[in-house]
Image (cartoon, rainbow, N blue to C red):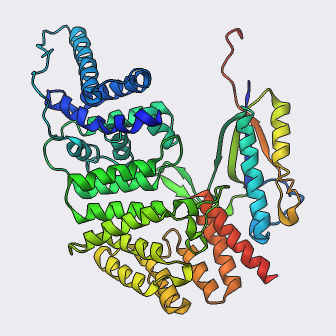
Amino acid sequence: MPKYLILKHYRGTPATVNDVPMDRWTPEEVDAHMAFMEAFGERLEADGELVDAQALSPEGAFVRADDQGRGPVTDGPFAETKDLIAGWYVVDVDGWDRAVELAGELSLAPGAGGRPIHEWLEVRPFYGAPSATGD
Amino acid sequence: MDPFYGAPLRELVPAVIGVLVRRGAVFAAAEDAVQEALVEALRTWPADPPHDPKGWLVTVAWRRFLDVVRSETARERREVAVEVEPASGPARDTDDTLEVLFLCAHPALSPASAVALTLRAVAGLTTRQVAEAYLVPEATMAQRISRAKRAVAQASFDRPGDLATVRRVLYLVFNEGYSGDVDLAAEAIRLARQLAVLVDDPENDGLLALMLLHHARRPARIRPDGSLVPLAEQDRTRWDRDLVAEGVTILQSALARERRGELQLQAAIAALHADAASAAETDWVQILEWYDELLALTASPVVRLNRAVAVGEADGARAGLAALDEVDPALPRHRAVAAYLHEKDGAHALAARLYTEAAALATNLAEKTHLTRQAARLNSSLR
């Protein structure tokens, strides 16, 4: 079974349909969204398709070695970057179509007014191991 | 883990390690051998329980130890005299739990290594259980534990260790367990109880009291969906009154000895919260007095931040904000406290903005969601 990364972004995707930041929802809408996410994760696990799910803080920095041989240098926080990853699901599923189907379900998480956000999710296949018969 | 055999079995682990060390095994090898005996016991005891559990563990662990020594000796093709049979006669009656605890919470170890080693060699958990509790692969945890054992290989088994480090490690276990089938908070309380019995020190009692008082609130702290319930909104009928009573009793006799320390003072604050029938009845004036004493003792920035909340409750939001001015704004949760105090002061738009900023700085998802929800609540009321 191939693995796919379903990537959530804080920003950097095309505009969503219901594009209101979470702190502008009602508390009940926040609760409904969290309950949807919780149920989605539990269902993935129950279906035997979940490998990993993690959420990332928006904080952080780019890091590289300094060209003067001193310690590493950092660039950040990410205030200026266009794209910011918020978290991911790693799923182990029958194939691309199923991964896209799952991302489509996740995209319907409720937002402001209880209406689906239609959030853009990024779906990326993992490279698999070479097969035993592939030569 | 089998609930019936698990806890009594695990309580024997440090003492059995001690027996092997007294017989001449180095700590790292003794610990490995006992871990193997433990895994074997978990497999066979439910169907075939031994009459003398500790004797069984000592025998099996010693045999494993000798197997390893023999195979290493053979591999090195050296003639090394190995004492195959231990000196007969009754095993020493002293309990080496404290010696093992000092070694596992050795100041030379990083907190994560000390926690892992303590959970295996003192709490008697398997590597797999420790790995699951901290959400890392089992191989990673096994490496962390062997590195930790190498780091303390030169430490003396009989020299008294650093009690403050032991307490810090136990508090970390209590506070930062994540998942798996082991209740790490309950494990930490069990170990803190042992420590309080083994070493007469009011701070050990303070640690135990603090854990009990926090643990008492656990049923009300988190909703079924995983979201956080702030102290003021918790259903106090769900607090465990027996744990509160035990914590308060332990704390009172510790405080009576007039050798106050940080943990006793924190427990005193927790006890005052536990004592209030409702959030409105909280004795904030007395809590503030404890915070003043705690700050004088520790000069800790986190204490200074929490004290600003207490000032806000005891003397009003403006006084709380003035106290917050003295706190380093880079501290985690500084923004959240500022939001809380500004809302209390009636500045709702400012508070909402601060809650949104605080949410972006949160270090866990439950807290982030809670803070976002606070911002949402204020923004909704402003519309």
Q: Residue at x 26, y 56 (%)?
A: B196
User: In the rendering, at what x and y percent does residue B105 appear?
Assistant: 28, 48
Position of B278 relative to B314 (above/below) = above
Residue at x-position 37% and y-position 65%: B247
Q: Residue A118 location, x and y as percent?
A: 87, 53
Q: Position of residue B88 (x, y in %)?
A: 10, 21
For this rendering, which residue is in front, B12 or A131? B12
In percent of the image, x 13 and y 13: which residue is there? Answer: B80
- Residue B63 x, y percent position in the rendering: 25, 17
Looking at this view, name the residue that lies furthest to the front. B51
Number of marks in the rendered image: 0
In the rendered image, the quadrant that contains the C terminus of chain B is bottom right
Q: Is residue B259 in sight in this rendering?
A: yes
Classify residue B225 as left or right of residue B333. Answer: right
Q: Residue at x 48, y 88 (%)?
A: B314
Q: Is residue A7 above or below residue B246?
A: above
Q: Is residue B251 left or right of residue B92?
A: right
Quadrant hosting residue B103: top left
Q: Is residue B363 visible?
A: no
Left or right: B86 as drawn, with respect to A125:
left
Looking at the image, residue A133 lies above or below residue A1: above
